[in-house]
Image (cartoon, rainbow, N blue to C red):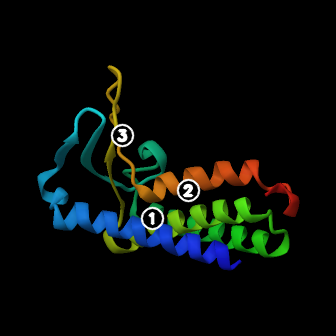
Amino acid sequence: MRLVAIVAAAVFLLDQLTKWLVVHAMDLARVGAIDVFPPYLNFRMAWNTGINFGLLSGHADWTRWVLISVALGIVLFVLVWMRRDPPGRMGLIFAGLLIGGALGNVVDRLLYGAVADFLNMSCCGFTNPYAFNVADISVFLGAIGLALFSGGKNAS
């Protein structure tokens, strides 16, 4: 469980630091867009009040609290799962990724009322209209990793 906590804390801190730097220090909240290495990496400010790809956005304030509750429920579920049936070192790392990312987005919803998304990547003639953040990447990798490495202690 210590490994889960270390990874979760590292992801959480990295997520919140990058959001603070980009949104506040670089003033992306006001500027709206910064081309870093176009078209491969751009910062595009997007306040996501919903879930992935803006699903459930634009609804009443109750959606914010439902999504916070769901995220905290998932964190609790994963923590109980890791305590009862630890999936080995890799599984613990992936659990930490998922938990740290989920908590990073929960903090955004509490502070801003929405998740601060800013990473935008396009390539090879495909223009990606969506933005994401470090927490989103961590939740995605954590969920995929847990699906692959949840076979018990021998799965490391």
Which residue is located at x 58 percent, y 76 percent? 6
Work out which quarter of the rendered image holds the N terminus and state it. bottom right
Which residue is under mark 2? 139
Tell me whether the residue at label 1 lies in contact with that at label 2, contact meaning CB atoms closer than 8 angstroms: yes
Q: Position of residue 34 (x, y in %)?
A: 17, 47
Q: Which mark, residue 130?
A: 3
* Numbered-mark total: 3
Q: Position of residue 140 (x, y in %)?
A: 56, 50
Mark in the foreground, 3 or 2: 2
Crowd tier of the residue under label 3, counting other residues whose Cα lies within 10 Å: few below 14, some 14–19, many 20 or above? some
Which residue is under mark 1? 105
Q: Is residue 121 left or right of residue 7?
A: left
Which residue is located at x 25 percent, y 46 percent? 44
Determine the CA span between mark 3 and mark 2: 17 Å
Location of residue 18 by image quarter: bottom left
The amino acid type, in three-letter code, at marker 1 is Asn
Q: Is residue 66 visible?
A: no
Mark positioned earlier in the residue sequence (1 or 2)? 1
Mark positioned earlier in the residue sequence (3 or 2)? 3
Above or below, 154 against 112 in this view is above
